[in-house]
Image (tube, rainbow, N blue to C red):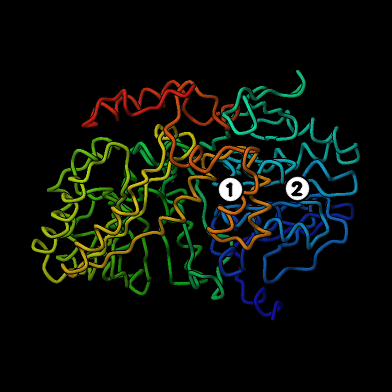
């Protein structure tokens, strides 16, 4: 079975023939093959490694793997979902590698991790990794391998200190975290010696050739799709948005030098193209790209597109997508309340949302999915009524268009202005309120689990003390009840769940990721937070709890 799954792959790159002394390397995705091979990030890193003759790379998933080396020197994980940490620990044990970095010796591989989860806040998982790669892999990956080769035969501690000198490479064991008390906030985060950088800077790739699929397969969760990255980051800078703030600046792929050649290459193996990016239609030449894809030679191409900016939904866009076998479009509006949209910096008027629905229907699309949140800082109960009214109005404006309201709970994310704000304890009731009001209107309501949002917040604002909690939770069965049981067992040794999840933090507080520098300095994030709180109905002073 394993052989047939790998045999179904159509590669869009040429793997190198490994040298005699190539470094035995395992590159893992901590989930099943169908999920991992659909990750563009995983595809790109794997291809980048596999094209090097100085590496012998084997892939590992939770269900299948290629032939694995007996003594790997490098073991990497791509992490794009927080709860996959359980699978990382399981895979380490399967490979007989200690799950904690401090228990490894010179006979064990260097265990590295990368991906959006670890770039945002690696601290809850820091004790499990020798090395974390912060930021874009384009330059960082090659620099990591080259630096490792320089110290390949050195003792482990020498290797780690050398790797820590490379920009963007974070070696957690070389930093000491001091707490005010075992169950209180952080007092300081310092490197253990003057040889180690005090701050690690996330690395940003600034080229105009972005990512595209390196493999297409019918076994992927998105069957036979060729993905091409149109834009990276987002210029909107919604206050809660990790996809914007963590990946700044906004970068666009060159249409003639990057996008069209990539699409043409993809079309040699499939007719299904996915345009990816946080805000695809904000590419400055998107209309030109759309015109190109509207040519008769692309008539049999099935085109899907990631979330688009609401005010760019034209009749022409809808027509092109409908003709290319897309029935639905997704837009993120966050809330039906203009006040809440101002709080989050969503520059969007009500009439633009209405026009998007009208244009989607006029262009031949069958449904429109709108994404929003409850529990955004400053949100009041009346703002939920505004969302209900908006959806009712859209139904009247575009009769026959199927409407879906996908709704999550606000979760604070590191390196965003709302990193200091806690999860609203009323969020679950607000999700229930929207369900009660929208379903009778014939609107498909799809809430994300509130309980999952609590765990997401715990991990997005967590520190190293959570590693003990995560191990216990895995042992207890990895359910919400397991987390509660683990907190109970560790009472007095780590802060309470409320500290990580619901508390508003002081802007003077030392944050778990303060030694890891994102694109914007803390002072800028505080300024953006202050701008958001001017729209609160309550006084801005109440917005932050001074527990510093």
Nearer-the-camera pick, 435 or 532: 435
- Image check: 189 left or right of 95? left
Q: Crowding at label 1, few (<14), some or many (≥20) Cα neighbours within 10 Å?
A: many
> Which residue lies under the disc numbered 1?
115
* Residue 346 appearing in the image: yes
Name above or below for residue 58 compared with residue 487. below
Q: Do the residues under discs 2 and 1 have CB atoms within 8 angstroms? A: no
Element class at badge 2: strand
Q: Residue 111 has which mark?
A: 2
Nearer-the-camera pick, 382 or 238: 382
* Residue 464 appearing in the image: no
- Image check: 253 left or right of 439? right
Q: Crowding at label 2, few (<14), some or many (≥20) Cα neighbours within 10 Å?
A: many
Query: Which residue does the image show at 17% across and 69% down from the upper left?
Result: 440
Image location of residue 259, percent across then percent down: 44, 53
Element class at badge 1: loop
Image location of residue 485, percent across then percent down: 59, 54
Query: Which residue does the image show at 43% across and 70% down from the upper left?
Result: 272
Q: Residue 375 has which mark?
A: none
């Amino acid at each position: 079975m394993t052989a047939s799954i790998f045999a179904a792959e159509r590669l869009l790159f040429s793997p190198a023939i490994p040298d005699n002394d190539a470094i035995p390397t395992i590159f893992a995705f901590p989930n099943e093959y169908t999920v991992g091979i659909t990750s563009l990030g995983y595809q790109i890193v794997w291809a980048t490694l596999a094209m090097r003759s100085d590496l012998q790379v084997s892939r590992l998933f939770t269900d299948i793997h290629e032939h694995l080396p007996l003594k790997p020197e490098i073991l990497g994980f791509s992490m794009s979902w927080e709860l996959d940490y359980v699978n990382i620990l399981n895979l380490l044990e399967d490979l007989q590698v200690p799950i904690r970095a401090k228990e490894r010796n010179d006979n064990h591989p260097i265990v590295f991790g990368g991906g959006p989860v670890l770039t945002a806040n690696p601290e809850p998982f820091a004790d499990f990794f020798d090395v974390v790669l912060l930021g874009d892999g384009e330059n960082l990956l090659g620099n990591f391998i080259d630096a490792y080769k320089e110290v390949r035969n050195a003792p482990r501690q020498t290797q780690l200190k050398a790797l820590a000198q490379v920009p963007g490479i974070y070696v957690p064991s070389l930093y000491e975290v001091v707490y005010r008390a075992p169950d209180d906030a952080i007092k300081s985060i310092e490197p253990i010696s003057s040889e180690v950088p005090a701050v690690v800077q996330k690395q940003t790739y600034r080229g105009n050739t972005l990512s595209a699929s390196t493999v297409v397969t019918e076994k992927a969760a998105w069957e036979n799709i060729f993905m091409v990255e149109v834009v990276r980051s987002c210029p909107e800078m919604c206050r809660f948005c990790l996809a914007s703030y963590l990946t700044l600046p906004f970068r666009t792929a060159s249409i003639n030098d990057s996008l069209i050649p990539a699409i043409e290459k993809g079309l040699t193996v499939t007719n299904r193209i996915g345009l990816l990016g946080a805000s695809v239609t904000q590419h400055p030449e998107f209309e030109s790209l759309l015109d190109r894809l509207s040519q008769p030679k692309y008539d049999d191409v099935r085109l899907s597109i990631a979330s688009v900016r609401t005010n760019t939904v034209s009749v022409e866009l809808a027509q092109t997508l409908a003709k290319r076998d897309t029935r639905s479009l997704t837009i993120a509006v966050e809330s039906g309340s203009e006040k809440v949209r101002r709080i989050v910096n969503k520059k969007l008027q009500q009439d633009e949302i209405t026009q998007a629905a009208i244009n989607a229907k006029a262009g031949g699309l069958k449904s429109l999915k709108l994404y929003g949140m409850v529990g955004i800082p400053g949100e009041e109960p009346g703002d939920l009524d505004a969302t209900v009214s908006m959806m009712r109005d859209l139904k009247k404006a575009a009769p026959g268009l199927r409407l879906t309201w996908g709704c999550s709970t606000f979760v604070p994310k590191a390196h965003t202005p709302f990193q200091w704000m806690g999860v609203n304890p009323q969020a679950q009731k607000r999700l229930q309120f929207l369900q009660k009001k929208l379903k009778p209107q014939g609107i498909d309501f799809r809430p994300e689990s509130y309980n999952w949002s609590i765990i997401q917040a715990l991990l997005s604002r967590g520190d190293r003390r959570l590693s003990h909690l995560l191990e216990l939770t895995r042992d207890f069965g990895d359910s919400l009840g397991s987390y509660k049981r683990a907190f109970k067992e560790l009472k007095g040794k780590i802060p309470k769940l409320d500290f990580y999840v619901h508390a508003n933090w002081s802007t003077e507080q030392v944050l778990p990721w303060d030694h890891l520098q994102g694109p914007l300095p803390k002072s800028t994030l505080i300024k953006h937070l202050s701008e958001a709180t001017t729209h609160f109905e309550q006084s801005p002073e109440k917005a932050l709890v001074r527990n510093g």
